Amino acid sequence: MQIYNAGNIDHNSRFVLSIVIGLLGAVAMGIIYGMVQSILRIEFEYMYILIGWLIGEMIRRIGHGVTKKYNVLGAVLALIAMMTGDLVVRFGFSAIVMVIQEPSLFLSVFAALLNSFRSVWGIFGVLFRVMGMYIAYNRATVL
């Protein structure tokens, strides 16, 4: 399928390129979202949908993939972007350095998500995150 071959790169190289650029983009989106949210002190649940859409589009345009692994990559990268944003909101910009030194800190975001099931707004927050991951999953492939 020459039409999907981005610059005559083979399938595996495109997937690796999608992982590398997608991971950098997801972390950058998470940092930007976290900084905006911590400055304004308001949670924009709709941004999770936008993050999912942007990551799905990025994976689709970079990878030109047609298999399910691109879909899964889009959903995982959306989750990484959302968790990075939550870490930046919770611990500040230094959270990125803290996670590199202490990777178990990333699990504190899961604990915060489990605590959010105590209120209706917390449940809505989780649903918007899932919706963003679903949109990234669907947008990540060409077909």
Image (cartoon, helix red, strand yellow):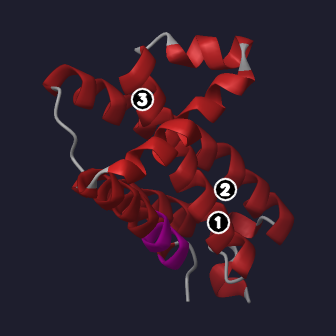
- SS at badge 1: helix
* Residue kind at label 3, given as amino acid type: Ile
Disc 1 to disc 2: CB gap under 8 Å:
yes
Q: Secondary structure at mark 3?
A: helix
| Towards the viewer: 100 or 54 | 100
Asked if marks 1 and 3 touch (Cβ < 8 Å), the reply is no
Bounds of the magenta segment: 133-138
Residue topped by disc 2: 18
User: Which of disc 2 and disc 1 is earlier in sequence?
Assistant: 2
Number of the front mark, 2 or 3: 3
In the image, is residue 102 above or below residue 71?
above
What numbered label is drawn on residue 31? Answer: 3
Judging by the rendered image, the residue that carries numbered circle 1 is: 63
Q: Determine the image quadrant of residue 29.
A: top left
- Quarter assignment of residue 38: top left
Amino acid at dot 2: Ser
Q: Is residue 136 left or right of residue 40?
A: right
Q: Earlier in the sequence, mark 2 or mark 3?
A: 2
